[in-house]
Image: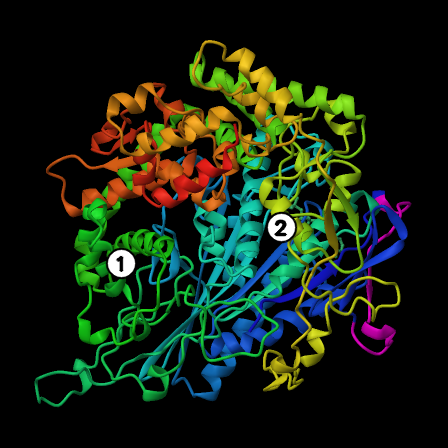
Amino acid sequence: MSVRVVARVRPLLKHELDKDTIVTASNPGHDDDASPTIVRIPNPKNDAELYSFQFNSVYDQAATQQTIFDNEVSPTVKHLFNGFDVTLFAYGVTGTGKTHTMRGGKTLAERGVIPRLLSSIYRRCRKIEKDTAGGTDVEVSMSYYEIYNDRVYDLFEPPEKRTPSGLPIRDNNGKTVVVGLTERPCYTLKEFEKLYDEANVNRSTSATKLNAHSSRSHAILCVKVTQTSQDHTLVSTASAIDLAGSEDNRRTDNNRDRLVESASINKSLFVLAQCVEAISRKQSRIPYRESKMTRILSLGQNNGLTIMILNLAPVRSYHLDTLSSLNFANRTKKIEVNEVENEPQFRGPPVSKSTAPISGPSLHRQPLRPLTAGSYNATATTNHPQPEAKKEKPIKAFSVYTDKRRSGTRPSTTIARPTTTTITTKRPLDSSSTTMSSRPTKSIRSSEISRPSRPAATAPAPAPPISQQEIEELISRRIDEKFAERALSENPTAAAALNPELQRRLDSLEQRVQEREGENAEGLQYLMMARQHQARGEDVSALKMFELARPFFPGNRKLEGRIGALRERVSVRKEAEGLEGRGMDSSVRLEPVKGAGDAASRGEGKAKGDMAPPPLPLTTAARKPHPVHRKLVEPSSDELSRPSISLPPTAARAAKKPKGKISRSEELKDGNYAEPDRASHKHREDDGEGDAYHEVEGDEDEDEDEYHSDASFRFRIKPKTKPKSKSATTTKQSKKTKGRQMTVFQDEDASHVGTGIGFGAAGGIGAADIVAERRYGDDVAGTETEKETQQTPRTKHILDTINSRDLAQIRRLKGVGAKKAEAILRGLVEGAVGEGEGEESREESRDESRDELELVGDVEDRMGGDGNEVRGEGGKGGGNMKVVKREVRSLKELGALKGVGMKMVENMRVGVVV
Ligand SMILES: Nc1ncnc2c1ncn2[C@@H]1O[C@H](COP(=O)(O)OP(=O)(O)OP(=O)(O)O)[C@@H](O)[C@H]1O
């Protein structure tokens, strides 16, 4: 089933009473008896035009805490006790009422979803114990942690006692676990409330201009319910997540500390939006790993029920942010989650060779998981055969709601993330390992993976076709799983022996990463943000981020070089824009059309020079730079006043794609888009026990046309300014290259300025090209000397671009999309392990290597080197990791990079026009 999305519009706050209310909840078809399911909000450009977004439920300003709980959360309690995991999370801009909804106030009426949920859980515990006459024992325990600046901290630990690096997280059988998290049993509601209140004191909150008690972290509460009867134990978890809100730092007046927090909050929310985006596009790679929050939330990958509460402020000052949130929620509601309940652990007779009767003392209670599994549900091995029905339960992998009728087949890219041991054995890991072991460059990894971790007989499922990227993901997941498996070993004795050692290793690993970041952590964070901006072609923000990073890396030539190049680029662009006047960017115009904008909601076009948290409609960006995008630094007044948009090449491509069918736009009187009444297809049984999640069978299929598009905007590409005439270019180049055999490229920066288009747009092919063309063969097959001395302009351009490691530039090469550009960058950074390292060290090294890449992708900045090959500091802290950065010196070398190939090289070459 899909993620259930409910929107809640908060009431006006005291200081907003005189403000304009622009967000309203309304009923489908204006039926007064029906519950509201539509949020309406005007077009920021034209108040008379209303946008409509449909969700499962919508609550207006008058909705009470009780109503929200009764309608949305209470029904899940029954499912929780039936073995389903329940995930509730609040999403919204800062100050929209997330914490109020989740935690609430102190009075009975003001209590939020969490205390009410717990109250309901305890009530049910008592009922079960009573109904079974004490035959079933129910235990409730909680863990509570926050993700602050992308680090996980146990909220049961006061800040002064925390390890600065926070707690490590690992994947275990498809679930993310926080290693070393405290889990506290709480037998009564009172005990829970005491612990919860104490822990909340440790949560990072600060006053900002927009919210006096703004959450500076994502808070994750996990309530584990363990039901133990005579013959089985059933464990399920309710997770309640209060996300930090995205912030517009122009409005928050954030100081430096708040800015860093804000950068981290916005980054994680941006990654979340990217994940949702990738899921909805059915991409094989979902960037969960790019932020701890997304790893933990694992939207679309966790089983059970997921409810998102979208908090909205009703006032105009939040207009653009609200639209952005609505667009995000609009896509989130289409994510399907696995509806798989946790398997009970049976306590029947163990399968034993012994024929001795099993009774009394031999009937051991199943060991529970160690108290370290944060968001983990025990689904341990059973000593009793699984019931047949359970075994055959089909695995529901996540997928996006499509317009097509469901067929039995799933896209080959979908990888099921099992929750039970039984299902785990079906994972086609072995088959993937076979593929990998055939790759010589992967010898280390292949040896990791090809080790048969499970007998072939227990892996009956045929391997679906699997892409290289998925293989990569499998490898890294497998490595994490290994860590987690060990950390969470179910054998208490082994666990006792292993855990301290493993913990020590993990700690030292984390510490090493931490040390490596050291005092430069903040600087690295700026660098990371800068790289992200640069990758999106947002040069102004990238420049500012690099400048903020500068004090942390004094005298770093590479950094200085980047700042210089960016400055130049930005100033040339400004000049160009000055010439064009202060209208739209020369290459793009965006106009709203009826219906909701796919491309816009995908956030493909972004306001130039801006931070990009959850995507926003481009029309708004067109009108003025998006406020959320101006998060990290105050933009210059010039930047603010510039209403232009630079569309990255991918967005431009997307813009040219034909739009999907725009659904129901005509049906709406106001001419705006609303999703079909999905809620009306739900069968909500009001049995007081909450069966609200049962869908009427077959109903889904009737929705054929209803999920076509959340599109409301369309790009219009304005013809680019005429390129200079070929002859003029050639003449200019000829002058430049007088005395040389071939034309030489113009300044790299200048070539990218303004249009955002590289050499490919420059014009036709001149005579020099023909020479270059012929020499291409030499480049590929020639000697080293030839390669180095006789590079054609095209080759030189390609190699320079690749060696610049500038993601944005690499992406501009023909045939290189974002993914391939990333793959190339990764190919340039080689992880090697020193001799004499055991398997575990290799795992660690690989982990480090991944962290290394994930952190900034800018090892040389940290290492301070700028040479051709930079040896990393892997040895620091005892590790042997060596990070080698290399340069490609010929097209052949480039083609040999992992994931590149000569075909792609040829493609790049064709795209370069001299
Ligand atoms: N439904 C509501 N009824 C009454 N007051 C509300 C409601 N929702 C929010 N508020 C008030 O609005 C203010 C901001 O709410 P809250 O702190 O919950 O926002 P938030 O989204 O959690 O912000 P942040 O992301 O900064 O933590 C608080 O003073 C809160 O009491």
Q: Residue 384 vs residue 827: left or right?
A: left
The answer to whether the residues at label 1 and label 2 have Cβ atoms under 8 Å apart is no
Q: Position of residue 659 (x, y in %)?
A: 68, 59
Q: Earlier in the sequence, mark 1 or mark 2?
A: 1
Instruction: Name the residue that disc number 2 marks.
Output: 654
Q: Position of residue 247 (x, y in %)?
A: 66, 40
Whether residue 29 is in magenta: the answer is yes
Label 2 packing within 10 angstroms: few (<14), some (14-19), many (20+): some
Q: Position of residue 516 (x, y in %)?
A: 34, 28
Q: Main secondary structure of the magenta part?
A: loop
Q: Residue 95 vs residue 693: left or right?
A: right
Instruction: Name the residue that disc number 1 marks.
Output: 485
Which residue range is magenta in the image? 16-35
For image coordinates 65% across by 77% down, the residue present is 704
Q: Is residue 105 among the parts visible in the rendering?
A: no
Query: Depth-wise, is mark 1 or mark 2 nearer the camera?
Result: 2
Q: Residue 611 vs residue 889: left or right?
A: right
Q: Amino acid at mark 2?
A: Ala
The quadrant in which residue 893 appears is: top left
The quadrant in which residue 509 appears is: top left
Q: With respect to residue 34, does 22 lie above or below? A: above
Q: How is the image coloured?
A: rainbow
Q: With respect to residue 718, does 222 lie above or below? A: below
Label 1 packing within 10 angstroms: few (<14), some (14-19), many (20+): some
For image coordinates 19% across by 37% down, the residue present is 833
Q: With respect to residue 326, does 37 lie above or below? A: below
